[in-house]
Amino acid sequence: MSPDQAAGGFSLALSEEVQQTRDWVHEFARDVVRPAAAEWDEREETPWPIIEQAAKIGLYSLDFFATQWMEATGLGLVVSFEELFWGDAGIGLSLGGTGLAAVAVASNGTPEQMGEWLPEMFGSPGDIRLGAFCSSEPEAGSDVGAIRTRAVYDQATDEWVLNGTKTWATNGGIADVHVVVASVDRTLGTRGQATFIVPPKTPGLSQGQKFRKHGIRASHTAEVVLDDVRVPGRCLVGGKDRLDARLARVAEGKRVGEQAAMRTFERSRPSVAAMAVGVARAAAEYATEYATQRVQFGRPIGQNQGVAFQLADMHAAVDAARLLTWRAAWMARHGHAFEHAEGSISKLVAAETAVRVTEQAIQILGGNGYTREYPVERWHRDAKIFTIFEGTSEIQRMIIGRAVTGLDVR
Ligand SMILES: Cc1cc2nc3c(=O)[nH]c(=O)nc-3n(C[C@H](O)[C@H](O)[C@H](O)COP(=O)(O)OP(=O)(O)OC[C@H]3O[C@@H](n4cnc5c(N)ncnc54)[C@H](O)[C@@H]3O)c2cc1C
């Protein structure tokens, strides 16, 4: 760790540990993930053998996730995600999707809940487990307050009974542990919601439709149906006392802090931004290499200002997105509130950058860029997801707009 970082200051010099992690993840992304990317994109299936390989080296593991989540400078996770998604976004999300469910429990759960459920979400080599975070519903996407899935407490058995339909869940239905946001009191919107852990093989939970997607096709996305799903009282994230106290404050008309699902999204935004940076960087590097090799009119196409200026813009945009991502990650790790919507800024800029840069890469590759013989068309399809999930670009602009104007922008 550099002296600046030891003092809690912001430094762009990555610590030795983070550099080692970056190089280790890059090696896996280069040697295992990227060569397998086209195949799993075509198969549109969860790449179990790759997850198994990642588990064997400890990359898909609770230990790796926890170490990077707690990493002192705050940059461990974002640097790792950039490398992994540089390899491939679909496979990257298959390896990283469990993290969102884990963050929902790690951010708001009790130490007992973390100790019990986080290992169940990752498993071990030879016994891979997955987690899924289920917030979105058919009628509640951007409008999280409209969640209809109900959670009713059964005092006689100390169980919660969940009913509803979740949609767009990454790893939904194939996960071992589902983390589900449900409404305890619908009249209160997000303030009446709570998060529940659904243990493996709980009766009543089933997979609905599996979606066939535009990009990130190696990542499984599906509906999750909850039909009288009974979970023990200890599966309410944060515990019942905390929920009861919050509902009592709301009933008295007192202000309560932001709802847990919102906090999960806010903390995870820099990580999602880092994924987008990885895809954008892959495209910028690939197009640069191509532009120095491809000859037209007797010279490399990169010698034309028209092409070189595009490459310059692409690399500048990737750099800018990364810096915003590192700033937000550093702030989150050091307990600085995103008072100027820095988390949303990182996600907005990185997502839009990934879409633009991958599109520019197709243009630079010409006809080749438009075929499946080259990876840039896949990267362009993959990049689009970053403007949609974990809050669309419009929702990020709404949050930033509120921060800059102080108005209740809607
Ligand atoms: C591949 C994939 C994986 C996903 N993984 C998960 C997951 O693991 N868990 C999970 O819970 N969810 C997941 N999601 C859901 C994702 O977070 C939602 O799709 C997203 O929040 C948008 O919701 P929606 O699709 O219902 O769109 P809508 O909310 O219907 O939005 C449609 C359009 O309207 C715009 N819009 C909506 N409201 C406003 C407004 N107030 N102002 C301006 N514009 C607005 C949006 O920006 C968007 O352009 C995933 C989605 C996809 C596609």
Image (cartoon, rainbow, N blue to C red):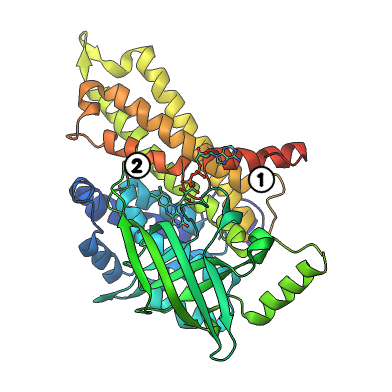
Q: Which mark is residue 382?
A: 2
Q: Residue at x 27, y 52 (%)?
A: 218
In this orientation, which residue lies closer to the viewer: 160 or 17? 160
Q: Amino acid at mark 2?
A: Asp
Classify the position of the N terminus by image quarter. bottom right
Report the front residue among 37 and 146. Answer: 146
Residue 306 is drawn in which quadrant?
Answer: top left
> What residue does disc 1 label?
341
Horizontally, residue 66 falls left or right of residue 211, namely right
Q: Residue at x 54, y 61 (%)?
A: 148
Across and down, in percent, residue 121 comes to 39, 73
Q: Position of residue 84 (x, y in %)?
A: 36, 52
Residues marked 2 and 1 touching at CB (< 8 Å): no
Residue 275 in view (yes/no): yes
> Relative to 355, does residue 148 appear above or below in the rendering?
below
What's the residue at 28%, 34% (across, down)? 376
Neighbor class of circle 2 (other Cα within 10 Å; few <14, some 14-19, many 20+) is many
